[in-house]
Amino acid sequence: MEFLGIVCGHQHKRVTVLDLQSRQLKCRLSPHIGNLSFVRTLHLQNNSFSSNIRLEIGHLFRLRKLDLGNSFFSGDIPVNISLCSSLEYLGLVGNNLSGVHAAGTLRKNNLVGEIPPSFGNPSSILRLSLDQNNLHGRVSFQVALGI
C-alpha cells in the first residue's frame, strides 16, 4: 500500500516510510511520531517545525534513516536517539540545535563544547559530519569485524 509520501509494509500493513520532505509544513512535531513502530525511513527535512525534536523518536527501534535537516528544530538533540540501534543515517543539518548527544550529520548547528566519548562507538552510523559548529575534542571510531 502506498500513499503520497507514505509507504506501508506488505506483511503487517504498517507505515515503513514517511517522506514529508519539502511539504511546507508549519507545525510542531507530534508526540504520536513515536507510535510509528515499524517506520524505517523518516524524511521531514525542509519544513518549518520550529520546536524541539521529540523524545518519542527514540521509540523508533527499526529506524534506519532519519532526516530532519533545515526544518527549524531547536533545543537539545534527544539523548534517547541512541536507542534507535538500527540508525544508519541521521541528518540534522541546518537547524538550531544546542546539545551533542548523537552521531550523524550535525553540521551547521550551534553545537558547542567537547565531542562526547559516545561518538567513538556508534551503533551503526555510517557517516559523521560535525563541521560548522563550535566543537572541540577527538573522535576515534571503533570498528567491529564479524569474524
Image (tube, rainbow, N blue to C red):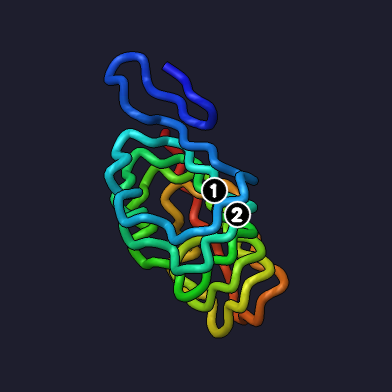
Does the residue at mark 1 contact the one at mark 2 (Cβ under 8 Å)?
yes
Residue 137 position (above or below residue 120): below
Q: In the picture, residue 92 is in which quadrant?
A: bottom right
| Residue shown at 30% from the left, 15% from the top | 11
Left or right, residue 109 beside residue 147: right
Left or right, residue 53 beside residue 21: left
Left or right, residue 70 beside residue 56: right
Quick one: quadrant of the N terminus? Answer: top left
Percent x, y of residue 50 = 53, 67
**Number of marks in picture:** 2
Taking depth in this image into account, of 99 and 31 the one nearest to the observer is 31
Indicate the amino acid at tag 2.
Asn
Q: Nearer the viewer, mark 1 or mark 2?
A: 2
Left or right, residue 94 beside residue 91: right
Percent x, y of residue 61 = 32, 44
| Residue shown at 35% from the left, 49% from the top | 33
Indicate the amino acid at tag 1.
Leu
Taking depth in this image into account, of 77 and 125 the one nearest to the observer is 77
Q: In the picture, residue 135 is in which quadrant?
A: bottom right
Residue 21 position (above or below residue 115): above
Residue 47: mark in rendering: 2
Question: What kind of element bears circle 1?
Answer: loop
Residue 16: mark in rendering: none
Q: Find the residue positioned furthest to the bottom.
A: 113
Taking depth in this image into account, of 61 and 30 the one nearest to the observer is 30
According to the picture, the residue beneath numbered tag 1 turns out to be 44
Quick one: quadrant of the C terminus? Answer: top left
Q: Residues within 10 Å of mark 1 (few under 14, many from 20)?
A: many
| Residue shown at 60% from the left, 54% from the top | 47
